Image: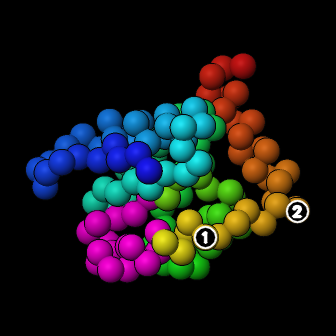
Amino acid sequence: MVDHGCDSEESVDYPDFAAAVARSVAAGACERGICVCGTGIGIAMAANKVAGIRAATVHDEFTAEMSRQHNDANVLCLGARVLDSRHAVEIAEYWLTVPFGDGRHSGRVAKINALDDVRAGT
């Protein structure tokens, strides 16, 4: 486990932490990552700027499951102002157990990954 988190309760620039987690996952140093900000939205947007990252903001077990099974999400984004800490931990633990569904979803994930080339201008 690698911890790229902040060490206090003070306000931080969440894109810096999203980038650190996303780069670790994209480089293969970590299989998956988990990010937290107020809503989970901004940190997902930032993480998704890193090529190879499929970050998903989830709020319950169903969206956690779908993010893994259908989209092969490799970064989970949670909202600290949206979820209580107990539920956030339950979602994260569950998300870590859900495998990618493969099959018909593989082609869709390949298309998502191909969008990295569009962002790079190729």
Q: Nearer the viewer, residue 103 or 24?
A: 24
- Residue drawn at x 71%, y 40% as measured from the top left: 113
Give the labeled residue for mark 2: 103
Secondary structure under badge 2? loop
- Of the numbered discs 1 and 2, the one sitting upstream in the chain is 1
Please, is residue 51 above or below residue 59 in the view? above
Q: Would you say 98 lies left or right of 6 here? A: right
- Residue drawn at x 54%, y 37% as measured from the top left: 29
- Residue drawn at x 29%, y 47% as measured from the top left: 5
Pointer 1: residues within 10 angstroms few (<14), some, or many (20+)? few
Pointer 2: residues within 10 angstroms few (<14), some, or many (20+)? few
Q: Would you say 96 lies left or right of 102 here? A: left
Q: Magenta region: which residues? A: 77-92
Horizontal and vertical percent for residue 37?
31, 56
Give the labeled residue for mark 1: 97
Q: Which residue lies furthest to the right in this view?
A: 103
The span from disc 1 to disc 2 (Cα, nearest Å) is 18 Å
| Residue type pointed to by label 1 | Thr
| Residue type pointed to by label 2 | Gly
Q: Which residue lies furthest to the front in this view?
A: 1
Q: Are marks 1 and 2 in contact (CB under 8 Å)?
A: no
- Which of the labelled discs sits on residue 75, or is there none? none
Dividing the picture into quadrants, the one containing residue 96 is bottom right
Looking at the image, is mark 1 or mark 2 nearer the viewer?
1
Horizontal and vertical percent for residue 48?
52, 42
**Residue 35 seen:** yes
Q: Would you say 74 lies left or right of 17 here? A: right
Horizontal and vertical percent for residue 79?
34, 64
Q: Residue furthest top?
A: 122
Q: Does the magenta stretch include residue 16?
A: no
Secondary structure under badge 1? loop
**Residue 49 seen:** no
